[in-house]
Image (cartoon, rainbow, N blue to C red):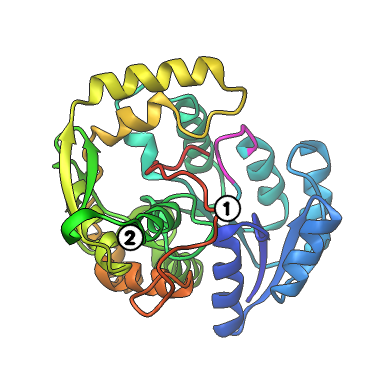
Amino acid sequence: MRLLVTGGSGFLGGYVLAEAARRGHACVALARSAEAARTVAARGATPLAGDLDDAADLPGIFARAECDALVNLASLGFGHAPGIVRAAERSLDRAVFVSTTAVTTTLPARSKTVRLAAEGEIRSSGLSWTILRPTMIYGAAGDRNLSRLLMLLARLRGAPIPGGAPLVVPVPGSGSQLQQPVHVADLAGAVLAAVERGAAARRRYDVAGPEPLTFAEVLRKSAAAVAARVHLVSVPLAPVIALTRGYERLSRRPRIRVEQWQRLAEDKAFPIDAAALELDYAPRPFAEGIRAEAAALGLGRSSPSSPPACSPPVSISSPTR
């Protein structure tokens, strides 16, 4: 199959292009810059110059790709869906779109309305569409979530602690909120399975890890992956939110936002029965995936006690783009 891929130069895009090649598919990847073109070419795809901001040009660009199906990995949170759908309808039949479970939040999230409108646009189109909603994605450097947590835990692991006591890690809230992270390679497999299976047409799937874990369990398993002994201490969420609100006002580019803490207070657990049945989706256990990520980052048990000094501050966040 010949696939037209948007978002191929991104984090998930690398895994999808690799999995597509492994399955024998040829990929044409939309690239808005020379750097993006080089990235997708290095990943085995044929670059195709195009910018999702230029909706009027997309029908011609999509037609020139001469592909059998669209794999849209580009975020649905920026208002591009109408242009993408209209362009795809003119030259394609099959299309798979990656959304996010973040649209289920009860908070007035900035991109929730845009994403839900995008899903509505897709569902009302003439395409043979499939929508995948992944949870928090992890699995390698660049995941914007757990890689930063692992780096921080590994950094703290090397700190001298009197008497060999475990690290005291503050946990905003009770730590009982449910999380269900999905490994990026498992998500990539689900994307390709959705493309290949006609039965997945006009269906929406939640794509998450095999089972919900409490936030405290996620922290403990992540700490174990880098051989860090931790003692979790619950702290009230309200003052954390208040401090973050002040930080947001003062920072031009805040690295953590109030909405992320508020999302942390929500359960994020989703059934994956439909994906398991219809896409043969069988995600790896979190403990296995996070150990592999720690090893890939050089932070495992046999690794040096601290990561590079440039490691960024940690925050656990839901997808916001």
Pointer 1 or 2: first along the chain: 2
* 49 w.r.t. 188: above or below: above
In the picture of the structure, the residue carrying the numbered disc 1 is 310
Please tell me how crowded label 2 is: few (under 14), some (14-19), or many (20+) other residues with Cα within 10 Å: many
| Residue 170 visible in the picture | yes
Q: Quadrant of the N terminus?
A: bottom right
The percent coordinates of residue 18 (x first, y second) are: 59, 76
Residue 197 spot, x, y in % from top left: 44, 71
Q: Is residue 78 magenta?
A: yes
Identify the residue shown where x is 32% and y is 56%: 181
Q: Which element is circle 1 on?
A: loop
The three-letter code of the residue at mark 2 reads Arg
The type of residue carrying mark 1 is Cys
Residue 49, located in which quarter of the rendered image?
Answer: bottom right
- Picture coordinates of residue 35, whole percent (x, y): 81, 57
Q: Is residue 212 visible?
A: no
Is residue 227 magenta-colored? Answer: no
In percent of width and height, residue 277 lies at 26, 69
Q: Which residues are magenta?
A: 75-80
Residue 157's disc number: 2
